Amino acid sequence: SMGPIMASNPCGEQFLHFANSCNLGSIDVNKFYDRENRLDWDRLAEVTHWTTRFLDNVIDTCAWPLPEINDVVKRTRPLGLGIMGFADLCLNLKISYGSASSIDLMDEVMGFIRREAWTESLRLGAERGVFPELESNRESYADFLYNEIGISREVPLTPRNYEVTTIAPTGTISLVAETSSGVEPNFSWAYVRKDTLGTRTYVHTLAAQALGVDVDQTDADSIDAAASYVVEHEHELPGYFISAMSISAEQHVHVLAAAQRNVDNSVSKTCNGAVNDTLESVDHLYRLARQLGCKAVSYYRDGSREGQVLTSMKSEAKTETPTVVTTTTIIEPLDEVAPIGTESENEAAARRLAEAEAAARKQGAIRLERPRELRGATWRIPFDGQNLYVTVNHDDEMIQEVFATGPISGGVGMLASKMLRGGFDAAEVSYSLNKVTGTHAVWFNERLLTSPEQAVAECLMITNRRLKGHPDSARALGKQTQTAPVGTQPVIGAIMSTMISTCPECHGQLEHASGCEFCRDCGYSKCK
């Protein structure tokens, strides 16, 4: 009677008729963990009942923007009650996310919430009246509620709502609740977040406890120490500490299917694939999702959104001093596509920059020459089982060259040196290098680094701060000035993954989860 449903919303959790509206709410299931009984089922039932009533009240309270929306919403009264904190609940129960036990847990928890939500909707319908579209669909709802959901036939057929459950991304609200997002696994056990209140380190309490570290979540020094330890000793975490990229895409799909079995509408979830996935393996993934009854599936291949070092290394023309090159003639080649061949992206970019510098010299631009003698420092930073060595050399006023050896392309140091001597500020070079993410993380200079390039950026900024008489770390400087230094950005530790791109609002890093993108730095969500 309502016509066909043409599409879902972008995140895949809501298939709606034209002019209908989603009405979403999420329960943090980890809050119901009970050490003795696994879950406090009585309390979960009570909260489910109250949440169902709350969402139904929203329909009557909301001022709908268009008459058509008001009409369709009042005729169907859709609710979208879902969950978040599932991955954290698995940790508390010592269950590996993606295992058969986690799938059984999903069936148990989401099936319980769905049944209790429908029970409350039937109770509400008896009190306030059924949703108007029921009359033309009474037979279908009788079969659905009594046979599929398992409601007793002694209960009158009085549903208040035409649907009650869905699972949304919860990217932003899970940050507020400090729990795992939707039905997604955790992405990192420690990260740094910057918002209007400042820059703060976060560490997953359960990860710290599993490593024998006591953390006081109200004390910044305690959190910093715990985060540093967790990052350095992540490999010692118990096997049930599962991150998004440590399980297969097929395991993600099976968790998604378990959630979908117990949801009226749909589920927003990302199935993370390996960097070497093929068209055939992705085709198999989508066919498996359909075979298992999933209504929507979001696929993300690891590394497919990694940024290139040079794409943002641009600068406005600088004319302040005669020793700085005019960069207008240097910028253009940076946007060219790197030739496919034996060169890496960094090496090709460095070559193009050198060619641009040569062209600039022909046009009379002044380039800073390297003195015969420079001073500097070398840092040894353990990275992915190897030692990364970063050397930064400078004169009395500015940084002039960078060398980096170890698990990093040799072109990175060459490129950074050419940029520095070509007129780019150290903070600009550092800012661009910070956008490169990798598959491992280390704690260095009071921040989390997720790639060797970020380590080079941090060494650049240490030297830059020392030349200005500032403390080595951005955090220490921030405590002195109450403002973050130019060119440094907070880093999110997606320890096992490279599935991060740049936030369009704060230029931090986006996580891809639940079929959506969200930023832990500023709370931005593509799905808002």
Image (cartoon, rainbow, N blue to C red):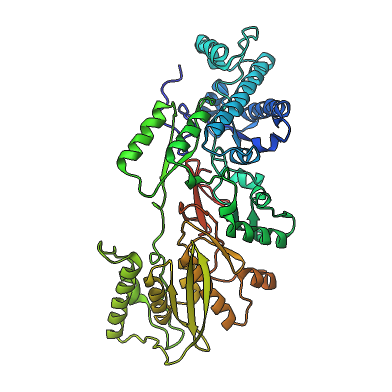
- Residue extending furthest top? 154
Quadrant of the rendering where the N terminus is positioned: top left
Q: Is residue 20 visible?
A: no
Drawn side of residue 155 relative to residue 414, left or right: right
Image spot of residue 108 (x, y percent): 60, 26
Image spot of residue 322 (x, y percent): 42, 88
Q: Residue at x 64, y 26 (%)?
A: 56
- The vertical placement of 127 against 284, above or below, is above
User: 504 or 242: which is nearer to us?
Assistant: 242
- The vertical placement of 288 against 138, above or below, is below
User: 467 or 377: which is nearer to us?
Assistant: 377
Q: Residue at x 63, y 59 (%)?
A: 229
Image spot of residue 361 (x, y percent): 30, 85
Q: Residue at x 39, y 28 (%)?
A: 290
**Hey, which quadrant is residue 58 in on the image?**
top right
User: 498 or 214: which is nearer to us?
Assistant: 214
Image spot of residue 280 (x, y percent): 30, 39
Q: Is residue 268 visible?
A: yes
**Hey, which quadrant is residue 464 in on the image?**
bottom right
- The vertical placement of 155 against 380, above or below, is above
- Residue extending furthest bottom? 372
Q: How many marks?
A: 0
Q: Residue at x 39, y 31 (%)?
A: 288
